[in-house]
C-alpha cells in the first residue's frame, strides 16, 4: 500500500478546517486561536466562518477585530480613507465569534478565549466605583500634577478646547502638512506636558517618536487612569460622561460607596484628560503609520520595541477609546454670554434628547431657559445619531419587539427635533433610592467576587438616560457592553415596556413582555431554547414564543450552579465539594495560565488532519470515513419530540438552598411582580415517543452554566474517491486522480465519492443515538464513553484506548447517501466539478452566483424541539457541547475540533 504524498494529503483534506493557536508577539497576552484552510486558495473556502457577520454599521464598535459589516442599507460613511494605527489589543473573547452560526452558540475562537476573557481579571485597585478614591490614587494624581516633570495642570475648559482641536485635525487629515512634527512638538510640551529634562533622541529631539515616548510614559503611570481592559469600565464610560448621580447607574453587587456630584465631576475631568492624552498619542501614531506607507517616515526597530514594551494594556485600551471618540464624537464650544434658546419647542420624543447636544460646564450641569451662562459650556454629541437610531430599530425588528411598527413610527415623528438640546436632568430615578454600584460582576455576601460565568448585571433604567446616550452617541468600546446598551436603550425609550417591566433590568437574564420571552445569550435558558424552531438571535439576545408557565410580564434571573475558581469560595458558599470536585478540578485546568489556549502546541497536535501519523509515512489504512447511524441495536426509524413547558420555580427557603421538589412552588398566574428581580431555577419538559415505544414526558433542569459551540463549516473535497472494504472501517485506497462521475472513468463497486473528510484512526470517539442516551440518562459521561456495547468506529484490532468524544446522534430518519439538500450549506454552496452539483437558483442563472451567495439568512432557520431537548440534557449534566450540523460540515472535522477544544460531547444534528 503506497504512502500518501503531500499532494495527496492536500487534495484529500481540501476544504477541511485546521485549528491553530498562535501568539501575536511579545506583550500581547494569551495566544490567538484561529481556523484556516491551508490547502485551499479559493476565497469562497478561506472565508468560511463559524460565526455571523455584523449586520449594521451602528454595531461596528462591538469588536476591535478586522471585520466586514453586512449593512442591509449598504451605508457608507463619507469620510475619506486614512492610515490608521491599530494597537495589538482586542477584546477577549472575540465578540464576532461570540455569535455562532447556531443560535445560542459561539465559535471556536470565543470558546477558547472564555477561560482567558477580560471579565475574569481582578478589579483595578482603587477604581471599584465612581466615588471617592483611596489615598494611593489621590496621591498619585497630585504628584502627577505638581511634580512639574510630566503633566501640566489643565482646566476642564482647556481640556475640552484641545479635544475640539484634535477633532478638527482628525477630520482634515493634516499629517502631510509641512512643519507638522514641530507644531505638534511645541503644542505638546508647551500646553500639555513638561518637556523632558534629558534628551530622548539626540539626533532628532523633536521627532514624533520622542513625543510618543513622553505620552506613553504619562498614560502608563499607575494609579491614575481608568483601565478599560476591565469590562465594567467599558460600560461605565457613558455613566461618567452623561450620568449624574449614583442612583442612575449599574447595580451588580452589595458594596456601598459614597458619591457626590463633586466626586462625579472630578472623575469626569480625569476621564476627559485621559481621552485627550490618548487622542494626542493616537494622532502621532497615525502620522507615523501614514508616513511609513508614503515613505516619508522611518521608524527604527528599537523604537517599535520600546513602544510595545512600555505601552501596556491600559495604554492600548486608551488608544481604542481615543479612536472611538475621534470617529464618533463632536465637541462644540458655546461662548460665554450665549443665552439658551427660550423658544425651543417642547418635545416628548426621545430621539431629540438622544441625538441632541449634551452640555458640559465646569460650573453647572445645565442651564435654565433664558439664563446666561457665566462660563463657556461645551456640547458633546455623537456625529451619527441617525445611524445609531436605525441600528436600534434594526435590533428591535430582528427580535420581533412587540408593537415595533408603532415604536418606529414614534421615532420617525420625533426625528425632526434632533437639533434640540438635552440638558442633564437632576430628577430622581424611580425605584433606585437605595441602590449603590460596585463591581461589574458583583460580590458574594462574604465579599468575594462572583465568577463571570454566573454574573448578574442589573441596571436602573431611566428615560433618555446615560445608557441611551452612550449607545446613540456611538462612543463605545469593544466587548459585551453593546448588547447590554442595545436592550437597555430599547427599553428606556419604550414607555409601555418601562411601565410593565419596571425600572430595574437584569441584562444578563431574561424577561417576558408582550406575549414573548427575551433572553440574554449569557443566560442558560436562552442558549437552550435558542435551538428551537422560530427563535431569533441578534446581538447577544434571543427572542422566542416560548413563555415560562404562569409568568407575568417581568424580569427574571436564572439560578445555575456556578463553578468557582477557588476551593475556599466553594466552602464559603456552602457548596457540596464532594459533588462538585470533579467539575472543579476540570475548571482549574481551563482557567488562567492553565487554560487550554495556553497549551497551544498540544491543541494543534491533537487536532491535526494526519493525527499522530508520520507525515512521511501516512497510509490510506490509517484513515476512516466516520460512520453514522450504525449501531448494534438499530435506532428507531421515527422519534417524535414535542416541547411541553418551561417552568420557573421560586424557592420558599433562602436562594442558596439546593433545588428539590419539596421546597419549590410553581408561579401563579396571578402573582404580583416583586420590586426586586427574583432568581428562579428553570425546568423544561418534553413529550418523547418513538415508533417502538409509548410516549412519556421527560423533564430536565437547566442548572449548569455550560456553553455550545458551532462546529466550523467545511466543504467536501472534490476529485477524491475512496475504496474501502465492508468488513473494515479503514480506507483501503484513495483516488486523487480527479475522476468524476460521468467523466468516463471506470468505477469499482466499492468506490464512493467523499461526502466528508477522512479521520485518522487515532481519534477515538463513541457514537450513541439520542433515543439510547435518553434511556440511559442517569449514566455519567465517563460511563457512556467506556461502555463497550456502543459501536466505536475508530477502534481497530489492537487498540484499547478510551474514546475521548461522545457523538450524540440527533438525526431522525437518517439517509445513508447524502441527498442534494444535505450538502454542507455555507457561503460556498458548491464547487465547480463537484460530485453533487446544485441546480441553478433560477432558470438561466449563472452557476457562479452560488459561490457569492450568503446563507446567513437561511442558516439560522434550523431548529427543532429535539435540538432543544439535547441541549437541555447537556445543561442538566453539565456538558459543554459542539453542535455539528450535517448540512454544514462533516463529522470528521467536528471530531478534530472537539479535540482542539478538549471538549467531550458532539451534538450531531440534521
Image (spheres, rainbow, N blue to C red):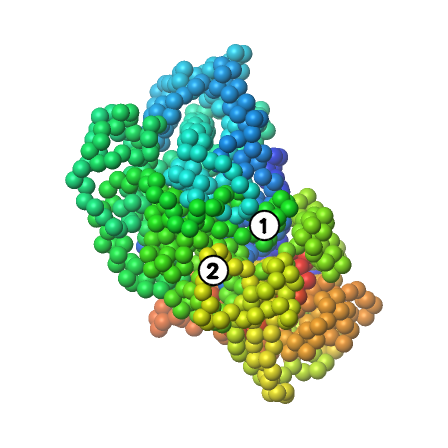
Q: Can residue 672 be seen in this view?
A: yes
Against 124, is 768 above or below? below
Which residue shows up at 34% across the image and 47% down it?
464
Q: Can residue 848 be seen in this view?
A: no
Which residue occupies the foreground of this view, 663 or 312?
Answer: 663
Can you tell which quarter of the image residue 108 is in?
Answer: bottom right
**Marks 2/1: CA distance?**
26 Å
Which residue shows up at 59% across the image and 69% down it?
664
- CB atoms at circles 2 and 1 under 8 Å apart? no
**Where does residue 503 sit, x and y in percent of width and height?**
41, 53
Q: Total of numbered circles in the picture?
A: 2
Q: Name the residue under label 2.
A: 674
Which residue shows up at 76% across the image and 69% down it?
783
Q: Earlier in the sequence, mark 2 or mark 1?
A: 1
Which residue shows up at 73% across the image and 61% down it?
579
Which residue occupies the foreground of this view, 715 or 354?
Answer: 354
Which residue occupies the foreground of this view, 515 or 96?
Answer: 515
Can you tell which quarter of the image residue 785 is in?
Answer: bottom right
Q: Please state, as top left, top right, bottom left or bottom right, where the N terminus lies in the image.
A: bottom right
Against 704, is 380 above or below? above
Q: What element carries label 2?
A: loop
In the rendered image, the residue lying farthest to the right is: 798
Q: Is mark 1 on a helix, strand or loop?
A: helix
**Where does residue 198 sit, x and y in percent of width and height?**
54, 12
**Could you classify mark 2 by the number of other residues whose Cα lies within 10 Å: few (under 14), some (14-19), or many (20 or more)?**
few
Q: Which mark is residue 585?
A: none
**Could you classify mark 1 by the number of other residues whose Cα lies within 10 Å: few (under 14), some (14-19), or many (20 or more)?**
many
Q: Mark 1 points at which residue?
A: 452
Choose mark 2 or mark 1, whichever is in front. 2
**Where does residue 168 sit, x and y in percent of width and height?**
32, 30
Q: Judge left or right: residue 446 versus residue 304.
A: right
Amino acid at each position: 500500500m503506497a504512502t500518501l504524498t503531500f499532494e495527496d494529503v492536500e487534495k484529500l483534506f481540501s476544504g477541511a478546517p485546521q485549528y491553530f493557536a498562535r501568539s501575536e508577539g511579545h506583550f500581547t497576552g494569551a495566544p490567538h486561536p484561529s481556523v484556516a484552510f491551508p490547502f485551499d486558495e479559493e476565497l469562497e473556502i478561506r472565508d468560511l466562518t463559524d460565526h455571523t457577520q455584523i449586520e449594521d454599521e451602528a454595531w461596528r464598535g462591538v469588536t476591535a477585530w478586522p471585520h466586514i459589516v453586512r449593512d442591509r442599507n449598504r451605508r457608507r460613511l463619507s469620510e475619506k480613507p486614512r492610515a490608521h494605527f491599530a494597537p495589538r489589543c482586542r477584546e477577549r473573547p472575540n465578540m464576532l465569534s461570540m455569535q455562532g452560526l447556531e443560535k445560542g452558540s459561539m465559535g471556536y475562537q470565543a470558546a477558547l478565549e472564555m477561560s482567558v476573557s477580560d471579565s475574569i481579571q481582578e478589579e483595578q485597585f482603587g477604581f471599584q466605583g465612581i466615588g471617592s478614591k483611596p489615598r494611593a490614587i489621590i496621591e498619585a494624581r497630585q504628584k502627577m500634577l505638581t511634580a512639574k516633570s510630566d503633566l501640566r495642570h489643565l482646566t476642564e475648559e482647556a481640556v475640552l478646547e484641545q479635544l475640539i482641536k484634535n477633532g478638527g485635525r482628525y477630520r482634515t487629515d493634516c499629517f502631510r502638512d509641512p512643519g507638522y512634527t514641530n507644531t505638534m512638538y511645541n503644542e505638546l510640551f508647551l500646553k500639555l506636558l513638561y518637556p523632558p529634562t534629558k534628551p530622548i533622541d539626540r539626533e532628532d529631539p523633536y521627532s514624533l517618536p520622542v513625543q510618543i515616548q513622553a505620552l506613553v510614559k504619562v498614560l502608563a503611570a499607575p494609579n491614575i487612569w481608568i483601565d478599560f481592559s476591565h469590562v465594567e469600565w467599558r460600560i461605565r464610560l457613558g455613566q461618567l460622561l452623561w450620568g449624574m448621580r449614583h442612583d442612575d447607574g449599574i447595580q451588580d453587587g452589595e458594596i456601598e460607596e459614597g458619591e457626590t456630584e463633586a466626586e462625579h465631576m472630578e472623575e469626569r475631568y480625569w476621564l476627559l484628560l485621559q481621552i485627550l492624552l490618548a487622542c494626542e498619542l493616537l494622532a502621532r501614531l497615525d502620522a507615523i503609520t501614514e508616513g511609513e506607507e508614503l515613505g516619508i517616515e522611518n521608524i527604527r526597530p528599537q523604537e517599535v520595541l520600546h513602544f510595545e514594551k512600555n505601552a501596556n494594556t491600559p495604554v492600548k485600551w486608551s488608544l481604542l477609546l481615543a479612536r472611538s471618540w475621534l470617529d464618533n464624537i463632536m465637541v462644540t464650544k458655546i461662548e460665554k454670554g450665549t443665552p439658551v434658546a427660550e423658544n425651543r419647542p417642547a418635545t416628548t420624543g426621545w430621539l431629540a434628547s438622544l441625538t441632541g447636544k449634551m452640555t458640559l460646564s465646569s460650573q453647572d450641569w445645565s442651564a435654565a431657559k433664558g439664563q446666561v451662562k457665566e462660563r463657556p459650556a461645551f456640547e458633546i454629541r455623537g456625529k451619527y445619531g441617525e445611524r445609531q437610531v436605525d441600528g436600534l430599530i434594526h435590533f428591535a425588528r430582528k427580535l420581533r419587539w412587540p408593537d415595533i411598527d408603532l415604536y418606529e413610527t414614534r421615532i420617525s415623528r420625533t426625528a425632526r427635533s434632533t437639533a434640540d438640546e438635552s440638558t442633564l436632568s437632576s430628577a430622581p430615578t424611580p425605584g433606585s433610592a437605595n441602590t449603590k454600584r460596585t463591581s461589574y460582576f458583583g460580590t458574594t455576601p462574604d465579599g468575594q467576587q462572583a465568577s463571570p460565568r454566573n454574573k448578574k448585571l442589573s441596571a436602573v433604567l431611566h428615560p433618555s438616560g446615560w445608557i441611551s446616550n452612550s449607545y446613540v452617541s456611538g462612543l463605545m468600546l469593544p466587548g459585551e457592553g453593546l448588547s447590554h446598551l442595545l436592550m437597555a436603550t430599547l427599553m428606556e425609550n419604550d414607555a409601555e415596556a418601562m411601565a410593565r417591566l419596571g425600572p430595574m433590568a437584569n441584562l444578563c437574564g431574561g424577561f417576558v413582555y408582550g406575549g414573548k420571552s427575551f433572553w440574554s445569550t449569557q443566560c442558560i435558558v436562552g442558549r437552550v431554547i435558542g435551538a428551537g424552531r422560530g427563535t431569533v438571535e441578534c446581538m447577544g439576545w434571543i427572542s422566542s414564543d416560548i413563555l415560562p408557565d404562569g409568568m407575568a410580564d417581568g424580569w427574571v434571573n436564572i439560578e445555575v450552579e456556578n463553578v468557582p475558581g477557588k476551593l475556599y469560595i466553594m466552602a464559603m458558599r456552602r457548596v457540596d465539594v464532594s459533588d462538585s470536585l470533579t467539575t472543579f478540578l476540570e475548571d482549574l485546568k481551563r482557567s488562567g495560565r492553565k487554560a487550554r489556549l495556553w497549551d497551544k502546541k498540544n491543541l494543534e497536535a491533537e487536532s491535526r488532519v494526519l493525527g499522530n501519523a508520520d507525515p512521511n509515512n501516512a497510509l490510506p489504512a490509517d484513515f476512516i470515513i466516520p460512520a453514522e447511524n450504525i449501531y448494534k441495536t438499530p435506532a428507531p426509524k421515527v422519534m417524535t419530540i414535542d416541547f411541553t413547558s418551561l417552568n420557573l420555580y421560586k424557592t420558599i427557603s433562602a436562594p442558596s438552598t439546593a433545588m428539590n421538589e419539596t421546597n419549590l412552588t410553581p408561579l401563579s398566574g396571578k402573582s404580583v411582580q416583586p420590586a426586586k428581580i427574583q432568581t428562579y431555577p428553570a425546568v423544561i419538559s418534553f413529550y418523547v415517543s418513538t415508533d417502538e415505544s409509548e410516549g412519556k414526558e421527560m423533564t430536565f433542569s437547566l442548572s449548569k452554566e455550560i456553553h455550545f459551540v458551532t462546529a466550523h463549516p467545511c466543504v467536501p473535497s472534490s476529485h477524491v474517491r475512496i475504496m474501502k472494504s465492508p468488513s473494515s472501517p479503514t480506507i483501503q485506497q484513495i483516488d486523487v486522480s480527479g475522476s468524476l462521475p460521468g467523466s468516463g472513468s471506470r468505477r469499482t463497486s466499492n468506490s464512493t465519492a467523499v461526502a466528508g473528510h477522512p479521520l485518522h484512526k487515532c481519534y477515538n470517539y463513541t457514537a450513541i443515538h439520542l433515543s439510547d442516551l435518553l434511556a440511559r440518562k442517569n449514566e455519567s459521561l465517563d460511563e457512556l464513553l467506556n461502555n463497550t456495547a456502543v459501536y466505536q468506529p475508530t477502534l481497530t484490532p489492537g487498540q484499547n484506548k478510551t474514546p475521548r468524544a461522545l457523538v450524540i446522534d440527533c438525526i431522525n430518519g437518517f439517509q445513508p447517501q447524502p441527498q442534494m439538500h444535505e450538502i454542507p450549506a455555507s457561503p460556498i454552496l458548491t464547487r465547480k466539478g463537484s460530485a453533487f452539483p446544485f441546480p441553478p437558483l433560477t432558470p438561466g442563472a449563472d452557476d457562479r452566483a452560488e459561490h457569492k451567495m450568503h446563507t446567513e439568512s437561511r442558516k439560522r432557520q434550523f431548529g427543532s424541539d429535539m435540538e432543544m431537548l439535547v441541549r437541555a440534557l447537556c445543561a442538566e449534566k453539565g456538558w459543554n457541547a459542539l453542535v455539528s450540523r450535517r448540512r454544514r460540515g462533516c463529522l470528521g472535522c467536528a471530531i478534530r475540533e472537539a479535540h482542539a477544544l478538549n471538549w467531550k460531547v458532539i451534538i450531531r444534528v440534521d
